[in-house]
Every structure is written in C-alpha cells, then in structure tokens.
Amino acid sequence: MSLDPETLFKTNEVLVRLMALAPDEVGKKHYHSCLFETVICVEGEIALFVVGNGHSQVLLPGQQASVPSPLAHWLENRRPTPARYILAQSGGAYDFLPLV
C-alpha cells in the first residue's frame, strides 16, 4: 500500500484526497485560514485532535469528523499498521498553516 497522497477530486474550492498515516505517525499540528475539513477513516484507526477541546476523537473505518477553520488540529495513527483516510477540504483556496 502506498502512503503517498492520491488526489481524487480538485477544483478551486474543493480538494479531496486519499491519505495515509504510517504506523505510529503523528501528523503536523496546523490550521487553515478558511477551509472546512472532513476526515473519513477508510482503514485502521485515526485519532483527530482539535486544539481547545481537550480530547481526541478516534475514527474507525466508515466514521467521519469535521474541523472548521481556523481551529488548529492534527491526526495520529496510534497503531502498528498503516491507516488510510479520505480528506475533503472545501470553502476556499487550500492552505496549510503550521503551528509553531
């Protein structure tokens, strides 16, 4: 299985990709200035963290969660096997603003 992102659909306002997290990978903490982001777990288990709410939401295959802008967030794969998910972003031009 490739861990490289695969673009499924792209316009000026929408970006949908099939993404993957390696075993035990922690994604970068970031936010978006105007994007609404939805994560749909396809395979494995993904933990979604949103800064300010104090807990994570664990997604299993078929489950989804959304993060509105500009809330900072990140994903984690806490399992020893890869996790795959669909990432749908909409509402404006794509940006990825890392937390420092």
Image (cartoon, helix red, strand yellow):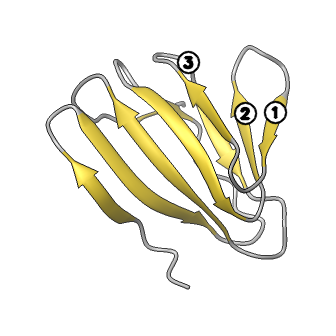
Which residue is found at the position 50% from the left and 82% from the top?
2
Which residue is found at the position 47% from the left and 16% from the top?
70
The residue that disc 1 covers is 56
Q: Residue 47 at what x, y percent from top left? A: 76, 45
Q: Quadrant of the N terminus?
A: bottom right
- Ranked by sequence position, the earlier of labels 1 and 2 is 2
Callout 1 crowding tier (Cα within 10 Å): few <14, some 14–19, many ≥20: some
Residue type at tag 2: Phe
Is residue 86 rendered to the left or right of residue 8? right
Q: Residue 15 at what x, y percent from top left? A: 30, 44
Q: Residue 89 at what x, y percent from top left? A: 38, 36
Spot the residue most to the bottom.
Answer: 1
Q: Count of labels shown?
A: 3
Callout 2 crowding tier (Cα within 10 Å): few <14, some 14–19, many ≥20: some
Frontmost residue, 99 versus 45: 45
- Ranked by sequence position, the earlier of labels 1 and 3 is 1
Frontmost residue, 98 versus 55: 55
CA–CA distance between discs 1 and 3?
14 Å
CB under 8 Å between discs 1 and 2: yes
The residue that disc 2 covers is 49
- Ranked by sequence position, the earlier of labels 3 and 2 is 2
Label 3: which secondary element: loop
Callout 3 crowding tier (Cα within 10 Å): few <14, some 14–19, many ≥20: some
Which residue is found at the position 75% from the left and 65% from the top?
44
Q: Which mark is residue 71?
A: 3
Is residue 62 rendered to the left or right of residue 20? right
CA–CA distance between discs 3 and 2?
10 Å
Which residue is found at the position 37% from the left and 25% from the top?
35
CA–CA distance between discs 1 and 2?
5 Å
Residue type at tag 3: Leu
